[in-house]
């Protein structure tokens, strides 16, 4: 079948990465919009969480979809990583400094590439995000069920060690998104110089915005702010 042939081709796998990445990005955007209700106070956040949990069938289907998306994204990413390594076992000898200079030399209108550091570390930042999500799920989704979720969030993220781990993890997420969004825009054909401003907004402003909104919660809690 043409569809299976497409998905097993190299370009098909790039599309799988791009589409699964885009859907995961939409999840992250909606998740961060939800947790931002904490800035309005614990009661607002608790109300949001209870509202969400009142649609259990929807949540269950959503979770299965999310798990599938993560699996597709991770497996395809690993496959492309090993395929590239097999095709070029000796990496290009180019220092980060030279690569950065080459990127800066590009005219602004050509739709600049993402930072080479973010591109080169994609498999590692991806792995760190996976570890973070496992820790995150054990803290919240599989955490104590007899305590309101708002209390669990405030107690865990107010712990300096745990809170700092979260801030570092969100920084890793922002670095991964910086190159990931750039790469998915390329794959989906949105790399024309006409879209330079849109590309800059998506690859730099959006990850930084996510980092500020999500990272602000543990930071304020550690500083003693009460939600
Ligand atoms: C301060 C920031 C964050 C807070 C307070 C937070 C809070 C939560 C809570 C309370 C849950 C449990 C939801 C439930 O059981 O219904 C959850 C689930 C989840 N979070 Fe976060 N989260 C944050 C950031 C993130 C980030 C950055 C990611 C991804 C990189 C993420 C990925 C997930 C995933 C995959 C789930 C499971 C989804 C589900 O159970 O439906 N979270 N989060």
Image: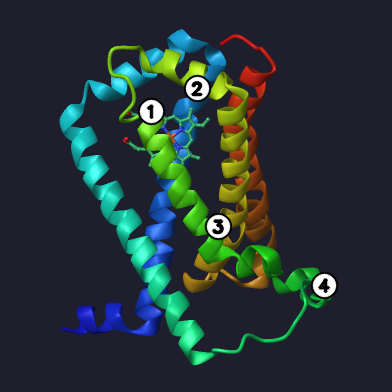
Q: Distance from label 2 to label 1 (Cα)?
A: 9 Å
Camera-side residue of 156 and 207: 156
Q: Which residue is mark 3?
A: 125
Q: Using the rendered view, name the quadrant where residue 218 is placed.
A: top right
* Render colour scheme: rainbow
Residue 91, above or below 166: below
Q: Which residue is mark 2?
A: 156
Quick one: SS at disc 3?
helix
Pointer 3 local density, CA inside 10 Å: few below 14, some 14–19, many at least 20: many
Q: Which residue is mark 1?
A: 140
Q: Using the rendered view, name the quadrant where residue 167 is placed.
A: top right
Quick one: SS at disc 1?
loop
Residue 178, above or below 46: below
Quick one: SS at disc 4?
helix
Which tag, 3 or 1, sits closer to the chain's start? 3
Q: Could you tell whether 2 is left or right of 9 in the image?
A: left
Q: Which residue is mark 4?
A: 97
Q: Distance from label 3 to label 2 (Cα)?
A: 23 Å
Identity of the residue drawn at 50% across and 16% down: 155
């Amino acid at each position: 079948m043409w569809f299976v042939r497409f998905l097993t081709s190299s370009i098909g796998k790039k599309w799988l990465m791009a589409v699964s990445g885009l859907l995961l990005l939409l999840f992250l955007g909606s998740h961060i919009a939800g947790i931002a209700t904490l800035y309005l106070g614990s009661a607002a956040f608790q109300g949001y969480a209870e509202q969400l949990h009142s649609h259990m069938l929807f949540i269950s289907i959503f979770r299965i979809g999310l798990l599938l998306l993560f699996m597709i994204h991770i497996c395809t990413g690993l496959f492309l990583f090993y395929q590239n390594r097999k095709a070029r076992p000796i990496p290009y000898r180019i220092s980060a400094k030279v690569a950065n200079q080459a990127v800066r030399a590009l005219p602004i209108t050509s739709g600049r590439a993402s930072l080479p550091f973010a591109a080169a570390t994609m498999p590692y930042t991806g792995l760190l995000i996976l570890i973070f999500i496992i820790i995150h799920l054990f803290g919240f989704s599989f955490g104590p069920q007899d305590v309101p979720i708002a209390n669990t969030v405030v107690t865990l993220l107010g712990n300096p060690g745990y809170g700092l781990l979260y801030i570092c993890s969100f920084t890793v997420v922002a670095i991964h998104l910086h190159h990931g969004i750039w790469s998915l825009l390329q794959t989906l054909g949105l790399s024309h110089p006409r879209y330079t401003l849109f590309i800059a907004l998506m690859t730099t402003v959006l990850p930084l915005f996510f980092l500020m909104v999500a990272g602000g919660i543990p930071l304020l809690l550690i500083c003693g702010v009460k939600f």
